[in-house]
Amino acid sequence: QGQLVESGGGLVQAGGSLRLSCAASGRTFSSNFMGWFRQAPGKEREFVAVISGSGSTTYSADSVKGRFTISRDNAKNTVYLQMNSLKPEDTAIYYCAGGPRYNTGSYVLARETSYDYWGQGTQVTVSS
């Protein structure tokens, strides 16, 4: 397991962009799927995107497809979430999570319970 620290959140106008980063500690980073989740005020936490250890496989929620891109740099132990064309409904706390070692399919990888460790979250606010 490892520690995760997110950064890059902030306030942006609708239509703008942000790139979130998640720095991970631990020697097994490249072996693990890494995911992004978000939680809006008054709502349950929801899946955003996930990437395999090699970076060759990604899955993302329908609500962000075509706008958000997940990537990783294993040499830097960092996973990214590039967010473009942001909408007010993207306002949430964004969490990085890690843990899965195998591709169990998008349905399972979208579940919070598939992840062993989480970051503290970073706030993203999109104004209209």
Image (cartoon, helix red, strand yellow):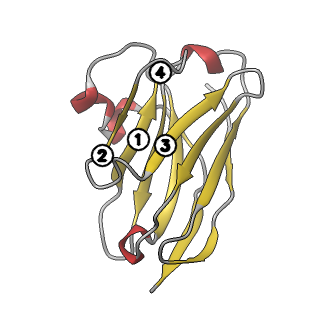
Q: Earlier in the sequence, mark 3 or mark 2?
A: 2
Q: Which one is nearer the viewer's eye here, 11 or 103?
A: 11
Residue wearing tag 1: 49
Amino acid type, mark 1: Ala
Q: Do the CB atoms of the residues marked 3 and 1 lie less than 8 Å apart? A: yes
Mark closer to the observer (3, 2): 3
Q: Do the CB atoms of the residues marked 1 and 2 lie less than 8 Å apart? A: yes
Indicate which disc residue 52 carries: 4
Disc 3 packing (10 Å; few <14; some 14–19; many ≥20): many
Q: Is residue 43 left or right of residue 73?
A: left
Amino acid type, mark 3: Thr
Q: Is residue 49 left or right of residue 27?
A: left
CA separation in Å, label 3 and label 2: 11 Å
Q: Earlier in the sequence, mark 3 or mark 1?
A: 1
> The residue tagged with tag 1: helix, strand or loop?
strand
The residue at the point 33 percent across, 47 percent down is 65
> The residue tagged with tag 4: helix, strand or loop?
loop
Mark closer to the observer (3, 4): 3
Disc 4 packing (10 Å; few <14; some 14–19; many ≥20): many
In the displayed structure, 41 sits above or below 64; it is below
CA separation in Å, label 3 and label 1: 8 Å
Residue wearing tag 3: 69
